Every structure is written in C-alpha cells, then in structure tokens.
Amino acid sequence: MPPTYHLTASISLALALGLVVYMLRRRASRVLRFIRPCDWDALCRLGPHQQNRSSLMDLALASPPTQSSPGRPREGVSYLRVGLIDRAAFVSRLQESERDGQPTLVLAGHADVALAAATFIVEHKLLRGGSCAAHIEELLPAAARSVQRYEALALLLEAAARAGCYKAILDAPPYAAAPLAKLGFVPSQATLTAVFGTPSIGGQPISPRLDQVEPRSLVEPADGQAGFVLRPLHASDSAAEVLPLLAQLSETVPMSQSRFTEQLLKMQGRLQVPLVVERCDGKLVGCITVLLQRQLLRDDELVAHLEDVVVDAGLRGSGIGRKLVLAAVRLAQEQGCSRAVLNCKEHNIPFYSKCGFDRCDLMCFARYL
C-alpha cells in the first residue's frame, strides 16, 4: 500500500482517539451542584419550550372543578396549562425553595453549563423505623430518552443513598420503563391527580405554613355517633399508638418514644405536616401526610403530595377515609396549591376516584436503595 494510505489511517486513528479522550474528560468533569439564577437560559433549552419560551404546554390533566365536587374536574374540557415561568419569578421561587430545604440540583458539564436538572425532596417518615424517601421532581431534559437525564438520575440516586433514604421515587410515562430499569427503577404504583385551582403566574412567591395548621372537625358528634377531629401529629402522641396504625399500611419497626419524637420534629415544617384523625375518646384512627412541592419552572407553583394515607381497619367503609382525603385537599387549597398528587395501588383507584382524583398518563417508579 502507498505510504500516504498508512499516514491517512494513522491520522484518522489519532483523531478518533483524541475525540474519545476529549469526550471522556468532558463526561468526567460533570458534577451535580445546586441550581443558580444564571442557569435560567440553560434550563429553558432543556424544557419542552425551546422554540417559544412564552408558550404553554397543555397537560390535559383536567378541567375546572364543579361546585358540587371541588376535587373533580369536568370531563372533556382541558384548562390547566403548565409552562415555563419568567426569569423574575424563577429567581424569587429559587430563593424560597432554598429557604424551604427543597433544592433543585443541576448536572453541570463543560464550562459549568447545566445539562440536566431535578428537584430533590427528602420526605421524612415514621415508617421503617423512621426512614426517609427521596422524591425526584421536575426532571429535565424533558426528552425521556436523553442521556443527560439518566446521568443526572444516577447521581441523584447516590445523593439519596447518602441522605439515608430507603427508596427514591419519580413519576414518569410508562414508555420510560426500559431506560429507568437500567438504573434499577421498577414500576411501583399508579399516579393520580386532582386539579382544583388555576395556577398563579408571576407575582410574589406563595408562602405556605403547614407548621401553623390548626385542628379542624372532620365529623361532628351526633346521636349515637362519635365525633372525629383532624389535627397535626404531636410529639406528645404515643409511638405505641401511632405505629400500629401505620403498620396497617406498610412496614413499621418498633421505635422508642424519644426516637419517635426526634423523627416527628423532622417531619414538621412549612412544607410538610403529618395529620391524624382523633376520635372523641382520644383514639387515633387515621393518618395522612401532606407534603408540598415548590416548582421552580412551572406555572403551578405549589403541588401537594398526599402520602401514607391509612384508616383503621375497623372504620373502613364508614366514610372517614373519604373525609380525611378531602380535608387534606382543602388544606392544600388553603396553602395555595392548584393540584394534589398521590400514588396508590390499582385496587385503591376506585376509592380515590370518589375523592376527586383521576389517573394521569404518568406512573410511579421506585428504586429501593
């Protein structure tokens, strides 16, 4: 072969190796860091609105609720439109989320440019001996098959493990199951949502205060019927009474009263409150946790997550469970939320449908750590 052929082949091989080394160095330099105001432009490019930042994406989740059923939307008329907010609102919400302890993390690459992003929420629980679960929300890039999306997810799983979480969960379309399975995620539960308000766009950030929730009547006492009150769980409540109730929902581990109190203090704050149903004789017969998520990039600033819903087996079918869920939805509305989200097993969907929730086109995926 002529010498020029070997020279050309050598140059091509050198260029290919150089490109591989360059790409490996760029990938090795990627880190997960807290979001900054200067990331706004990069995040806009990662979202679904690259062509027109002011455009809105119709989620087709629901339509305006009726007066007779505040949690249930009307069929056939879509009204909730969700899109990127403007830069000023983004900066204001960023400051609030930092104060609330709900950081948005970005995968930064070459020149510190944001390649992916997600809100990372640690939910403290009384289940499993006082463990915690990681919620991964607002995952960008919007494209489900983006490589950067799953690079960020892998690092977020490491962060969840370091935080002591026993699992990480996220809602995603069913067609994302295959790439998520490579990271150990498995389909877990159905995702349901109730829309009950119009998102607030612009203006000052909403300032929820779940740490100031007052007890409220759930069922007024009547002839031959006991009264029930919904109230925040207190440090003075007995772990020996609360944990058996939660055990009817999921795995619990015996916990000392001091450990119970310590974990409960972590669960109480501006954006999270565990609530219990107390019968007039003082017995606790139900519980639910309301967790608020502040969204940095969406028109609906606050979203309520309803977690760990359970009613004592002896009272199921009495209507207490429906009243409990509807009371939690009303509380979310009062705090400024425009929708509520929950995950449940297939056989519980009819119950939540009676509470105004509808199945959406997402499902919950879980990765146990």
Image: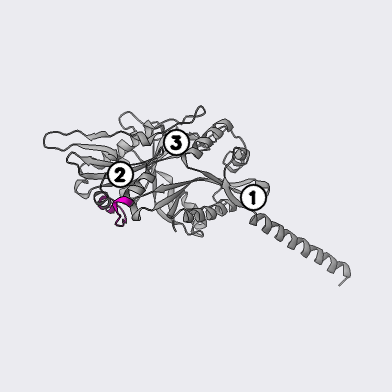
What type of secondary structure mainly makes up the magenta span?
A: loop
Count of numbered circles on the image: 3
> Which one is in front in this view, the residue at disc 3 or the one at disc 2?
2
Whether residue 171 appears in magenta in the rendering, the answer is no
User: Residue 99, labelled with which disc?
Assistant: none
Rendered location of residue 57, percent (x, y): 52, 37
Residue 38 x/y as whole percent: 62, 38
| Alpha-carbon span between mark 1 and mark 3 | 30 Å
Instruction: State the quadrant of the C terminus.
Output: bottom left
Does residue 173 appear anywhere in the picture? Answer: yes
Marks 1/3 in contact by CB < 8 Å: the verdict is no
**Please, what is the three-letter code of the amino acid marked with disc 3?**
Leu
Q: Earlier in the sequence, mark 2 or mark 1?
A: 1
Q: Amino acid at mark 2?
A: Ala
Q: What is the magenta range? A: 244-258
Q: Which residue is mark 3?
A: 302
Identify which residue is drawn at 38% across, 53% down: 131
Q: Which residue is mark 1?
A: 109
Residue extending furthest toward the top: 203
Callout 3: SS:
strand
Picture quadrant of residue 72: top left
Name the spot of residue 140 as percent of width and height, x first. Answer: 55, 46
Marks 2 and 1: which is nearer the front? 2
In terms of image quadrants, where is residue 26? Answer: bottom right
Which residue is situated farthest in the bottom direction here? Answer: 1
Q: Earlier in the sequence, mark 1 or mark 3?
A: 1
User: What residue is pinned by disc 2?
Assistant: 235
